[in-house]
Image (cartoon, rainbow, N blue to C red):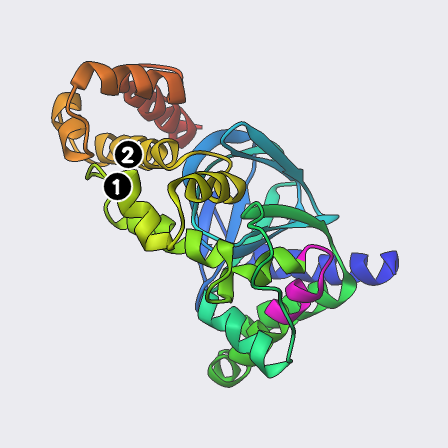
Amino acid sequence: MSEQIDKQRSELTRHIESYTGKDGPYATAIPALSFIRFSDVIGPNYGVYKPSLCIIVQGRKEVTLAQESYLYGPANYLVASVNLPIAGKVTEASPEVPYLALKLEFTSSEILEVLRDFQMGVDKKENAKRGLYVSKMEPSLLDAVTRLARLLDAPEDIKVLAPLIRKEIIYRVLQGENGGLLKQIAIEGSSTNQISDVIEHIMNNYEKPFKIEELSEIANMSVSSLHRHFKEVTAMSPIQFQKQLRLQEARSLLLSESADAADVSFRVGYESPSQFSREYSRMFGLPPIEDIKRMREQYDQKVKA
């Protein structure tokens, strides 16, 4: 089995290398499939994981959700079943053996379609579980992912074959050791599905204040059940979730625009610039202006190198 996985991983490595150049993420001609390459350790980088499958073929990575860390490499794969604000750090990479990975995003409707087509049962009453997990890589999954990447060399086949292979990949993930965690997201009435509706609402309105009673109505849960299930899925409270979204968006705005930190704090929903600065420093290690200056200097050094 290990020889089979090694062969599949070698082919996948060649595909990723041939479709990436400099460090960074690369969209591909296959919808929702992207490749990532880094030639040095990097991070933490902050962002929101959409529902997706993440596979590393070279190097290692640490993903942090709230206070929890998930370490994975070529022997594993990571799945996010809902939108989650995370911090990602590449912990093993070099110019000679760069970090190479891929991400395949999917939707709850795609999961539900696979569940229906293959008559895969699920318990609606099952309690919500964490929306992020790491599982052991299986040859059947890696084979399907390799065949999907192989379509990049035959672009005329992508339109017809990519949707079929995507469906197979989702099926393999659902059949995996933690597949039950992914099933829950697609089933209407399940706790995870109800929490995903709350997550979507917060993401679409992150800059606005909310009442917890409003969220409990969206989830069709009591306030206490909402808190419990939300923390089970995201490892944080709704307020903490919103705070992470606000701070990530603020950092992105400060990097992309020549905007004043106080102005950005108001734009992302803070009423107090001083509170914004404190919470920003707590999350990113430095006050807003110093943090952005450091990031730009690091970028300039990398470009010159």
Q: Residue at x 58, y 31 (%)?
A: 68
Q: Quadrant of the N terminus?
A: bottom right
Residue 11 screen position, x and y as percent: 70, 62
Q: Residue at x 73, y 57 (%)?
A: 10
**Vertical relation: 202 (above or below) 284:** below
Contact, mark 1 vs mark 2 (Cβ under 8 Å): yes
Where is residue 183, by image quadrant?
bottom right
Residue 127 screen position, x and y as percent: 58, 51
Q: Amino acid at mark 1?
A: Tyr
Residue toward you, 34 or 251: 251
How far apart marks 1 and 2 lie (CA) works out to 6 Å
Q: Which residue is under mark 2?
A: 246
Q: Amino acid at mark 2?
A: Arg
Task: Return the mark for residue 206.
Answer: 1
Residue 206 is one of the magenta-drawn residues? no
How would you classify the magenta stretch by its main secondary structure? helix
Left of 133 or right of it: where is 104? left
Residue 176 is one of the magenta-drawn residues? yes
Q: Name the secondary structure under disc 1.
A: loop
Left of 253 or right of it: where is 36? right
Q: Name the secondary structure under disc 2.
A: helix
Res. 255 in view:
yes
Q: Residue at x 43, y 51 (%)?
A: 195
Residue toward you, 112 or 75: 112
- In primary-sequence order, the first of circles 1 and 2 is 1
**Vertical relation: 109 (above or below) 102:** below
Residue 134 screen position, x and y as percent: 66, 46
Look at the image and give the residue range highlighted in magenta: 170-178
**Vertical relation: 299 (above or below) 179:** above
